[in-house]
Amino acid sequence: MLEEIGRQAEEMNADLVVLGARGSGFMRHVALGTTAERLLRKSKHPMLVVKQRAHEPYRRVLAAVDFSQWSAPLIGLARRVAPGAHLVLLHAYEGPFERMLQFASVDEATIAHYRLQARQEATQQIHALVASAGLEAAHRTPCIRHGEASLAVVEQEQEQEQDCNLIIIGKHGRNMAEELLLGSVTKHVLAESAGDVLVSTERRA
């Protein structure tokens, strides 16, 4: 099955591979499943993992960005898959070496100072990303949250005021060096999200 899906995608030069999360080999809230995870490790094609019955077009898309080379292509993919949808651009940040500083019992005022600097830098970067993509104000919402990225994405999806019915995330993140590995944040989001997840395999050169 895995080899056949991969072969067909390559032969067709597929724009998108779609997998149902309730199919054989999938455990919806526990693991992505053997077939999907193995495909994602090697695939050159974006992959949509469908977890819910389709009842309307995607109206709000949550794009997880970390300002790595995987982030910018997310916006273009979102426009192709969900044209007209409102785009929520989420970046989760932590202060530099924040956990190590806490472990070393560094005073909270110092940690808060570094955390504020990290937030200011993230704010500048997310506005630069919005500007470079040419996103109109009415069609996007920048969102910056403090915390661990994988938890922030799932929590943001579940917040009713955002009401996103699709998450789009890069195959890897800024710290991924090994192409055959699947990013840990991506794996967590695929396992824990309630809605559909679109994984982009494109990165900016």
Image (cartoon, rainbow, N blue to C red):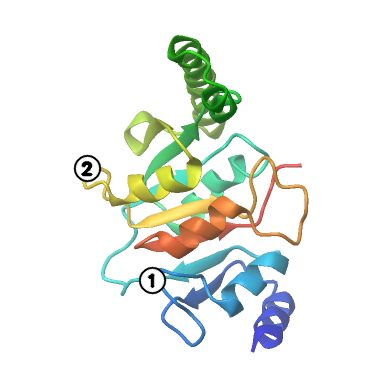
Q: Which comes before the other along the chain, label 1 or label 2?
A: 1
Does the image show residue 2?
Answer: yes
97 above or below 65?
Answer: above
- Is 71 located above or below residue 137 in the figure? below
Helix, strand or loop at label 1? It is loop
Mark linked to residue 181? none
Q: Label 1 amino acid?
A: Lys
What residue do we see at 48% from left, 69% from top? Answer: 49
Residue at 44% over, 38% down: 90
Left or right of 30? Residue 85 is left
Task: Identify which residue, 134 or 89, lies in the foreground.
Answer: 89
In the image, 178: left or right of 100? right
Question: Alpha-carbon neighbours of circle 2 within 10 Å: few (<14), some, or many (≥20)?
Answer: few
- Looking at the image, the residue that sits furthest to the left is 160
Q: Position of residue 94 (x, y in %)?
A: 51, 28
Place residue 69 in its image quadrant.
top right
- What residue type is disc 2 on? Glu
Which disc number belongs to residue 161?
2
The secondary element bearing badge 2 is classed as: loop
Separation (CA) of disc 1 from disc 2? 21 Å
Q: Is residue 132 above or below residue 28?
A: above
Disc 1: which residue: 51
Split into 4 quadrants, where in the image is the N terminus? Answer: bottom right
- 80 or 109: which is nearer to us? 109
Image coordinates for residue 174, horizontal then vertical, percent: 67, 40
- Disc 1 crowd, CA 10 A, few/some/many (<14, 14-19, 20+): many
Image location of residue 193, percent across then percent down: 39, 60
Residue 37 is situated, as x and y percent measured from the top left of the image, at 61, 70
Residue 170 in sight: no
Contact between labelled residues 2 and 1, with CB atoms less than 8 Å apart: no
